[in-house]
Image (cartoon, grey):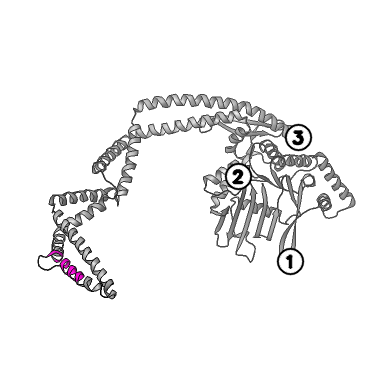
Amino acid sequence: MIQELTVQDFAIISNLTIPFKEGMTVLTGETGAGKSIIIDAMGLIVGGRGSADYIRDGAEKCRIEGSFFVSDNQQVSLFLENNGIEPSDGQLVIQREIYRSGRNNCRINGQLVTTKTLREIGPYIVDIHGQNEHQELMQVQNHLHLLDQYAPEDLRVNLISYQEKFRQYVSLKEQVTNMLNNEKEFVQRMDMLTFQYKEIESAQLMVGEEESLIEERRKLMNFQKIMDSLKKAHQYLDNDELNAVTLSGSAMSEMEQIESIDDEYAETTELLRTAYYSLQEATGRVSNSLEQLEMDDERLIVVENRLDIIRQLKRKYGETVEEIISYFNDISEELSTKLNSTTDVSKLQEELIIMKNELDCLADSLSQQRHEVAKQLEKNIMKQLASLYMEQAVFKVNFSATDLTINGKDRIEFYMSTNVGESLKPLAKIVSGGELSRIMLALKTIFSATQSITSIVFDEVDTGVSGRVAQAIAEKIHQIGEQSQVLCITHLPQVAAIADTQYFIRKLVKDNRTQTKVSELSEDERINEIARMLSGTDVTDLTREHAKELLSLAKKDH
């Protein structure tokens, strides 16, 4: 349900916040006060077409925010999850800003989204009905889904089983088609992948190998320089006549003789002692390196060849060894899949025929169930129409066959005849405003119990009716409000009286600017407002009594 609507700088609305309650809420007020503007604002936060014309004069942008409670709405939860939008403890906050430049900023729970996303989530949270608008109930493509929603659980279980089988069928059919139509391309692709697989596999690449080979090649190519430097270093350290080790040893001995005489030389002596032993160790290491050092021309050739292989593979399959290995893994998986799919096409075609027959049986079973459900739906809707004083109306669920689809082989359209002797016509062809309103309410009464829409908005759907029909419409709207939150703009006192909550919308002029204000009416204020709706401009004691009576009867009945 919608909990709160905030509108800023929208048409004649400067700044308005309306909290909404459960059940049935009506919005009343004189023509032009801004009732429909509020509904327009609700339409915008669920993806309605925006325009800079909506922006209040003097403002750079308009802003609409709706806060919804959706903890029980699984469709909304699934939508948020699929679109990567964080849920917020059963709360859904939608914001939309429209700038004079035409730019739109849309957010769901603080996350930026497109208006397309708002349009996609909109049907799950708000269903706006205006007179003569072909909304969900009037759109043929929705009729099959509505019938299935109305059906018992076993039909929906069977539909899910059918849909799983149908998806398998479509996948297999696509596979066979591709194999038949693209056999040459398939073979060429397999040849290419096989060649690439063997080429990379034979290289036996390892991560880090290239860097190690480059380092080894650098050492091999600098063998002579390393050898010359080692020889000179060894000569300086271990020359037969005069060398660094002997000299440092002699210096250390001299200092040790005077160390005991004067402590001042102890630190210097220790430094020479450390240097002497370090030079001895260094001499040993240089000597060992010289003994082990051996030029391997053949190894240099091996390293060069190996690096050349890596360079060739990098030119073809990736900029690094890691990328080549990743590509190898990808084509290995594709090869495996394609090799497994090279089963004889004729066998797959036989499997397709078997699966098609199974689908036909499942679809026939679904169709049979739907025909039974349709009979019950027809009976219940005509019962609802009769309570709206359309006793002569006939409602029919019209079936026609189609090729197999994700929903079976049924095409369904709702048909109506509103008067005796008239032929049945598609629901969308019903042109009388009063009739269409009642038909829509009858349908909505039936389907609201199975739909998970949080809020249903009726924008003057009661136009063109009066008397007992008006009372019946009022009761029907209230009945829908027992299943879903209902917001209703009305000019009928019968509808206003039966509501659980009533808001009064008025215009006022402040600082030479027209503004719209909304206030919830108390009991006495409701009496005055309903009396005004009954009599027009002059409210008399008699109309006030009539208003009290309407409110009293509404409370008694509900």
Which residue is nearer to you in this view: 23 or 392? Answer: 23
Upstream in sequence: badge 1 or badge 2: 2
Q: Secondary structure at mark 2?
A: helix
In front: label 3 or label 1: 1
- Queried whether the magenta region covers residue 252, the answer comes back as yes
Determine if residue 10 is in view.
Answer: no
Q: Which corner quadrant of the image does residue 234 belong to?
A: bottom left
- Queried whether the magenta region covers residue 532, the answer comes back as no
Which residue is nearer to you in this view: 205 or 364? Answer: 205
Q: CA distance from mark 3 to mark 1?
A: 47 Å
Could you tell me which residue is drawn at 72 percent across and 68 percent down?
Answer: 512
Give the magenta range: 236-253
Pointers 3 and 2 in contact (CB under 8 A)? no
Q: Please name the residue that numbered disc 3 is placed on.
A: 387
Q: Please name the residue that numbered disc 2 is placed on.
A: 123
Which residue is nearer to you in this view: 448 or 88? Answer: 88
In front: label 3 or label 2: 2
Q: Position of residue 279 (x, y in %)?
A: 20, 64
Q: Position of residue 511 (x, y in %)?
A: 72, 68
Q: CA distance from mark 3 to mark 2?
A: 28 Å
Amino acid tagged 2: Pro
Going by the image, does 195 lie left or right of 433? Answer: left
Q: Secondary structure at mark 1?
A: strand
Upstream in sequence: badge 3 or badge 1: 3
Which residue is nearer to you in this view: 62 or 320? Answer: 320
Q: Residues within 10 Å of mark 1 (few under 14, many from 20)?
A: few
Amino acid tagged 1: Lys
Q: Residues within 10 Å of mark 3 (few under 14, many from 20)?
A: some
